[in-house]
Amino acid sequence: MADFDDYAKVELGDKRLSDRLPRLLGQLAGDPGASILEACMDPYQAKAAYRFTGNDSVTTDAITEITHDVTIKSINDAAPPILLIPQDTTIFNYSNLKATQGLGSIGARWTDAGIMAHSAIAIGEMGVIYGLVAQKLWIRPPDMKGNAKPRNRQPIEEKESNKWVETVEKIGATFPESTMVVHVCDREGDIYELFCRAASEGIHYLCRKSHNRRVKSESGDEVLEDFVKGLPVADSITVKVPRDSHTGRVARDAVIEIKYGKCQIKKPSILPTDNHLPKSIEVYIVSATEVDPPQGQEKIFWELIM
């Protein structure tokens, strides 16, 4: 079982609460998929766990901060040559808890209610997981529904998507100089402000492309899709594709063509003109496309920005 002794340092205003936290974390870590009663293996211990989580002095910020410190310490001790920091958003759906107060909107229906969480973990070579390095929890206000268009023109600091930039800023340069740190984002992280911040601070990132942006290249002004089409094939590799019964994907050996190139992504016209962002930012584009997929099978296709 993991050692949670460092969590006794959390300031919760009551030493009894601080002493209980490591014990509770050890119980929950023993079987992460279990209920609190199952993990505690005792109704009295489970009741104590519920009292602990219901105490107003127990805050997520206090626990997240010590988690960040513990994870950073283990990374610094190991000094891995490469460290991946994937970040993503999780939705905690409590729609069935009709009497619960303080929940926010999480879906298209007004009855969909819960909590949003954006988390970043640190992963080393060979899949070594060092732990959580950042997390933000928030409640979406009801008035966010139906206001997507006005929000597009707001400064990034006023938008929910700022979670990507905030996470990069929070983690900062807290790792050994010998460690190459790469932030990993899905399509939702395809944000011009994030690319600008990373470039200005020398931060490495890898993001799956979402937007067909305007770019400047040696060929002139064009859209990103046309720029990638014009790139030469740099190499071909064969990868094993596992079967996926949910999508109907068959297991196969897929030949993947790799392309890559450098271009200047232009600042989106929808962004405010007074936000002091550069008019363009230099990025690399990597494309991976399957050659001749089996009939009836969707081809593997990835485009990454870095």
Image (cartoon, rainbow, N blue to C red):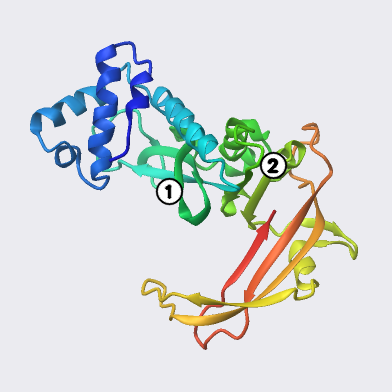
**Residue 38 appears left or right of 303:** left
How far across and how far down the image is residue 153, in percent?
68, 39
At a point 67% along the width and 78% down the height, the residue shown is 236
Considering depth in this image, is 296 or 14 the residue closer to the camera? 14
Amino acid type at circle 2 is Ile
Q: Which residue is mark 2?
A: 203
Classify the position of the N terminus by image quarter.
top left
Residue at the (68%, 67%) spot, across then down: 287
Q: Is residue 224 visible?
A: yes
User: Of the residues tagged 1 and 2, which is closer to the observer?
Assistant: 2
Task: Assess whether mark 2 and mark 1 are in contact (beta carbons under 8 angstroms).
Answer: no
Give residue 189's position: percent from left, percent from top. 60, 48
Q: Is residue 55 visible?
A: no
Give the spatial CA distance, label 1 vs label 2. 35 Å
x and y percentages locating residue 235 in the rendered image: 71, 75
Q: Is residue 42 above or below residue 304?
A: above
Q: Amino acid at mark 1?
A: Ala
Left/right of residue 194 with respect to residue 102 in the rendered view: right
Q: Residues within 10 Å of mark 1 (few under 14, many from 20)?
A: few
User: How many dots with numbers?
Assistant: 2
Residue 202 lies left or right of residue 11; in this view the side is: right
Choose the circle earlier in sequence order: 1 or 2.
Answer: 1
Name which residue lies at 35% across and 28% down: 102
Q: Which mark is residue 273?
A: none
Residue 160 placement: quadrant: top right
Q: Nearer the viewer, residue 102 or 68?
A: 68
Residue picked out by circle 1? 108
Q: Residue at x 76, y 47 (%)?
A: 268
Asked which secondary structure carries label 1, the reply is loop
